Amino acid sequence: MEYKGWDQVEAGAVLPSFSQKSCDVVNQKQEERNYADTNSYTASVSDWRVFKPVFNKDVCIDCQNCWVFCPDTAIVSRDKAMLGIDYDHCKGCGICAEVCPTNPKSLIMFFENEENEEVLSQWPEKKKKEK
Amino acid sequence: MSKIIKNLKQFSTSNDRFEGAHLLCPGCAHSIIVRELLNCTDDNLVIANATGCLEVCTAVYPHTSWDASWIHIGFENAATAASGAEAMYKTLKRKGRLKDPNKPVKFVAFGGDGATYDIGFQFLSGAVERGHDFTYICLDNEVYANTGGQRSSSTPRGASTTTTPAGRVSYGNKKYKKDMVAIMAAHGAPYVAQVAPNKWKDMVKKYQKALATKGPVYINAMSACTTEWKFPADKTIDISDMGTDSLVFPLYEIENGTKLTITYRPKNIVPVRDYLGVQGRFKHLFKKENEHVIEEMQKAVNEKWELLQRREEVGV
Ligand SMILES: Cc1ncc(C[n+]2csc(CCOP(=O)(O)OP(=O)(O)O)c2C)c(N)n1
Ligand code: SF4
Ligand code: SF4
Ligand code: SF4
Ligand SMILES: [Mg+2]
């Protein structure tokens, strides 16, 4: 989209969230919505990340801790199942990996430049309980 | 009509109305608190936002992160904006000029502690006194975060801030935190509560109660701030847990000014010292000459907890 200069913006700006007038937002999943390009959903903060969470579906128990505590609406959960991370909106804070209760964790933080397939193939084993 | 939320799995089927790519710091609790509010209801929402981190970071031209009606006017007047919108809505409804008069609409205001405890205090007091039907939520990070960490009247004793820096001659902020929950209850508001994002179920329950209440509601939400409290971004929930479990942030509600109910009793109470120890803003308290402040804070927390329990018992 084309940005206006600061001196071209009128006082009392209105930013529409959707491109259609009426949007039944509570009954629509994000992928079904007509976002306006003034909605931050259309933007990306992926370049904020130093570390990224990687999701291992095989260990996940769909508890949804990561979903409720993610500050950036970047955990994609649909129909009670955790599907993965929305890397456009994830800032790599690491909260999701901290609150993940499985052993080994289903979400682990890695350096942004590591390959997901590679780290998934070397996922840590179950840790024995420390006495 | 209240949305039924039995467990976290079911809660996770909510379609988010607070979008990502806002510019709040990684790990900021403000957005966790806001997401839980927007996800706890299916009603239409009209949201007024005071100036502060939440407002500044979620409406950065040309983007908005809000999929609900949202208005920002100034620092001090979120309560006024919400009351104005609510009064206009009632008038339009009475005059039969609403398109969909049966669709429930709820009015919510968000403000930081600077906006709430200090600068918007009389505006909030006025709105509650006039009895508008709205819910005011204070995102309490105990500091003016958005302007670089100045002390507010919510800043706890002993915290180092840019206007109360700890150093050779000072252990930081000397004043105790203002008891905003008690002050709002004293207005006779029908519902007043303290919440924390780590206790999501307690929070959702109180939010739903708040939205269902006719009349003004005040909610004080503990909002751990990774930048000003000085802790790593992934520890937001851990530190919030320590806040509620040390009883520095007790979770309770007050109905009609007097009926006080404690809604969370930690199984293992964490020493206040442990909560302070994980935050850089209290680091200097662990020097020998400042240790007395930790003891004083523990004593104040114990006394407050005792008072809450007695108020609950007696119902005053
Ligand atoms: C009348 C007025 N005074 C001062 C400011 C500058 N200002 C903008 S945000 C802010 C701090 C907000 O602190 P708080 O309300 O605690 O919210 P937080 O950023 O901590 O979430 C200040 C002082 C302003 N915008 N308007
Ligand atoms: S790292 Fe942070 S922003 Fe990214 S998905 Fe996890 S909780 Fe969300
Ligand atoms: S917290 Fe872990 S186990 Fe729970 S849903 Fe998220 S990834 Fe799966
Ligand atoms: S400074 Fe604190 S309150 Fe503001 S965005 Fe950062 S973490 Fe959130
Ligand atoms: Mg603040």
Image (cartoon, rainbow, N blue to C red):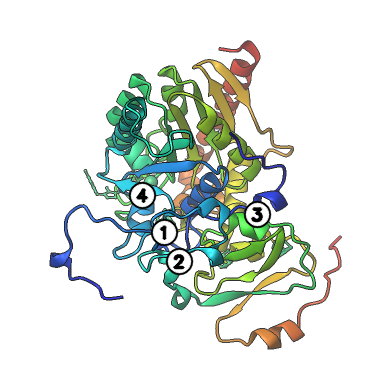
Q: For label 3, count other residues whose C-alpha is less than 10 Å away and answer few (under 14), some (14-19) or many (20+).
A: some
2 and 3 marks in contact (CB < 8 Å): no
Instruction: Tell me the subunit letter for badge 2.
Output: A
Q: Secondary structure at mark 2?
A: helix
Check residue A41 in the rendering and tell me which mark sits there, or answer none.
2
Gap between marks 4 and 2 measured at Cα: 34 Å
Q: Nearer the viewer, residue B206 or B197?
A: B206
Q: Which residue is mark 4?
A: B161
Q: Quadrant of ligand 2?
A: bottom right
Give the residue type at disc 4: Thr
Gap between marks 1 and 4 measured at Cα: 30 Å
Give the residue type at disc 2: Tyr
Q: Nearer the viewer, residue A64 or A91?
A: A64
Give the residue type at disc 1: Ser
Q: Which residue is mark 3?
A: B13
Gap between marks 3 and 4 measured at Cα: 40 Å
Q: Is residue B18 above or below residue B119?
A: below
